[in-house]
Image: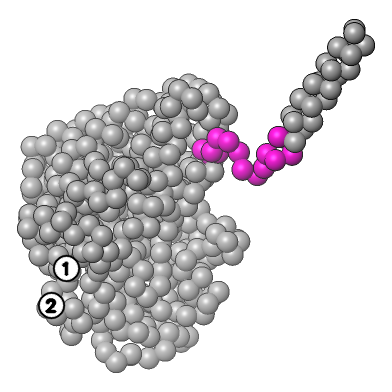
Amino acid sequence: MKGHKFILLAGLLATTTACNKFDEINVNPNSPLTANTGSLLTGAVRNVGTVNAQVGPGSFNIVPALYVQQFGDVTYIEDSRYKTVNFSYNGLYSGPLVNLQQVINLNTDPTTKAAVAAYGSNNNQIAIARILKAYFFQFITDRWGDVPYTQALKGSENFSPAFDKQQDIYNDLFKEWKEAVAQFDDGATVQGDILLGGDTARWKKFANSLRLIAALRLSKVDPAKGKAEFMAALADGVLTSNADNVQYKYLTDANNENPLYNNYQTTNRKDFAVSNTFVNYLKQVSDPRLPFMAAPNQRGEYVGVPYGVFPSPGPAQNFSLAGSTLARQDSPVNVMTYAQVLFAQAEAAKLGWTTGNAKTLYESAVKASLQQWMGAAYTEAAYTAYIAQPNVAYSEANAIERIATQRWIALFFQGTEAWNEWRRTGFPVLKPAPTTLNGGTDIPRRLAYPVTETTLNAKNYADVVARQGADTQYSRVWWDKQ
């Protein structure tokens, strides 16, 4: 009897072992039970590069750079004539924003937070994800105005989110950036951060600088709120040198190469060149940044492509493409720069928001921009000669115009930011394309919603159009009040 019991027990053990081995065989090692939050973050950060440097006909980053005439069309003279009216933000919601929300969820959920702590402390992962999530939402709302926000990213819980007012979104963005900075701890470094390498000090400066720029966006629509937020961000610590510049760094790899390089070299399309508006102004003021921003044409001259002129003015080799500083395979793109922060401080001082000296801050901003673009070629003599020119030197009577014009130069190939500041200040004074393709006569003030909203989210779309205005390129976003 004991023998039978032994056999039965041995059989049960063998069966259990076999089942366990069978279960192990059926576990896919390449499909982990808990998501790799480091990979999710990397995927989201790669979109920081995309939204700051996407190039190609109809792509939603080059378009604002065309609106403010930093670039012009070479072959298909359409984008500089405002042909595309509706642009889609769907990829941003379904891509980086979903990734970042998942990082936040996994690091918050008691059932997963311990496992994903392998990719950095829970608090640090959440803080970075919140900063970037707010960054992407600001990018979206600045382009389209009122957009889905509080009801967005709910998945199957809500396929038809309502549109939040831009003012409400901005108020929440300020809160998110402040709370995220406070959330960082001394725990493990975050993995997958290909933007700032998990450096919490740099993330804090970046978040505070985003708050600073966002606060200035309120200069005409809610100056009291703008001043309060600006002062708070400045006190918390913003970028303080070019060493703090935030850049997305591309690689000498076809899978992650600079989009201008891809357009100029990989595909040999050469769709866009530096516009004559931009080149001519830099030549007018003998700007030493010109050789770093633009490349000479086949004759060794700096010639901008005529802006918005149809038919095509000629082949790309006749005009100045973007310079090698921007167009190498691994050229980085700027996300936030010290010069940009200084120009904001100069304007805030001129507005009376701070006790800073507007002239000193303006001159420091110009110097920082020259140092940034010229690199080792920068000299104090070049700066001294440049800043002394009548059209460059600070002037109390037209300080905002001087600040805005120099910021327009400094923000070269940061199309959305340059367009944002042009809409807000009205400087530099730009003439629209001679003939347009969108039925209007002016430079666009916003992007129209993706056409999918009219069919898949019809009721909420009708509500936002009734509140914000016609879904055209000329209905202004909340802060755009000249």
- The quarter of the picture where residue 301 lies is bottom left
Position of residue 236 relative to residue 414, above or below, is: above
Name the outermost residue toward the right. Answer: 3
In the depicted structure, whether residue 189 falls above or below residue 194: above
Q: In the rendered image of this protein, does residue 318 appear above or below residue 15?
A: below
Let me know if residue 169 appears in the view. yes
Please state if 74 lies on the left or on the right of 138 as rendered: right
Q: Which residue is mark 1?
A: 473
Magenta stretch: dominant secondary structure: loop
**Residue 454 picture location, percent across and down:** 21, 64
Residue position marked by numbered label 2 in the rendering: 440
Q: Which residue is at the front of the view, 295 or 18?
A: 18
- Give the class, few, some or many, for how many residues have Cα within 10 Å of label 1's Cα (few <14, many ≥20): many
**The stretch drawn in magenta includes residue 34:** yes
Whether residue 135 can be seen here: no
Q: Check the image and tell me how it is coloured.
A: one colour
